[in-house]
Amino acid sequence: MGQGIERLGFTGSVVMIALVAAITLALRGAPFVLFGGRKSTPKFITYLGGVLPPAIIAALVVYCLRSTDFTASPYGLPGLISVAAVAAVHAWKKNTLLSILGGTVLYMTLIRVM
Amino acid sequence: MNERKLWKHAFRLTTPVMIGYLVMGTAFGIIIQTKGYSFVWAFAISLTVYSGSMQFVLAELLASASPLLHAALMTVAVQIRHVFYGLSLIDEYKKMSPLRRFCSIFGLTDETYSLQCSLKTPDGMDEGRLRFAVSVLDHSYWIAGCTAGALAGALIPFDFEGADFAMTALFVVIFVEQWQSFKGFKKRLPAMIGAVSAFVCLLIFGAERFIFPALAAATLALLALRPVLGGKEGADGTGN
């Protein structure tokens, strides 16, 4: 701070934080407000509730790797190798903590040596 | 006693998120503090906004004194993916008291969503209370990380770069578990649709804009495939 950057004042900051928080809550709550009040949830929502989670999780894996640069060295290899390692170790050992800790340590090592 | 068992179970479920949130939260705390906001701000933001990606954007918006309309549009753009998360939890969240329900909807981050949609309740445990405990624990890790980062983050001598991979690993783990529990092409099709639509939209829209079109396209594709996937036996067996 103090390098000539003018950040928002106290009130401005509070208003902006409240605005961002309110929009975030509104988006998270929208499906519950739209479809949650009825006695029985519409059938297409029940259907989506069953099939959406695997689709969303798959998309979130891609989302986490979205900024990977495949065109320059190390060609996104640390991320790809670590994701493959997590998947393999988890399919083999089925131990969530081991998969996540092991994968993270591997990734942190790879980005430093590759 | 039973209550203690429930929180212990929730702690075990949320441990991967704890690691990721403490690291990512600390990173946020360090950044917001360099913009001239003390740990009190970091605490207030992590309590009220509670979103990894959006808080980093918010730090920039605050520091550059952006107009409110710009901030609002940015928030919608970054956060709109969340409208899809509730769709799969409407009936599950009906099993909660109103206050617990509100807290759990409020706390529906990417990571908490991934735990909620893969959550299995042990016999004899109250599902609504367990879901609430998961939401509250995740939020408390995030607040702790953000506040600690703003307080002392710059003093920690360890280089944490890459530690946020814990979140990616969490999603991969849940993906593998879902993949293994769904046997057969038909039941694995939703996961494939999600992956393909994410890749295609990433190529078309670029890294910062692809997630909403990707989720929207996947939702439309799944709705179109409802006659195939949602047959009499399909809808109940595909997810939990």
Image (tube, coloured by chain):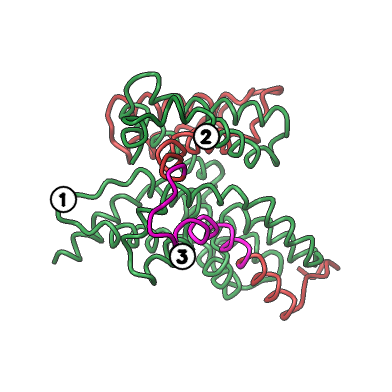
Chain colours: A red, B green
Q: Read off the residue under disc 2.
A: B223
Q: Read off the residue under disc 1.
A: B123
Q: Which of marks 2 and 3 is nearer the N terminus?
A: 3
- Is B4 left, or right, of B189 in this rendering? left
If the image is split into quadrants, where does the C terminus of chain B sit?
Answer: top left
**Image spot of residue A100 (x, y percent):** 39, 38
Q: Which of marks 1 and 2 is in front?
A: 2
1 and 2 marks on the same chain: yes
Query: What span is in magenta?
Result: A22-44
Q: Which amino acid does label 3 sit on?
A: Ala
The residue at 76%/78% (across/down) is: A9
Q: Earlier in the sequence, mark 3 or mark 1?
A: 1
> Is residue A104 at least partly visible in the picture?
no
3 and 1 marks on the same chain: yes
- Front residue of this view, candidates A18 and A46: A46
Q: Read off the residue under disc 3.
A: B144
Disc 3 crowd rating (10 Å Cα; few below 14, some 14-19, many 20+) is: many
**Chain hosting mark 3:** B
- Front residue of this view, candidates A102 and A52: A52
Q: Nearer the viewer, mark 2 or mark 3?
A: 2
| Magenta-drawn stretch, dominant element (helix, strand or loop) | helix
Which corner quadrant of the image does residue B181 belong to? top left
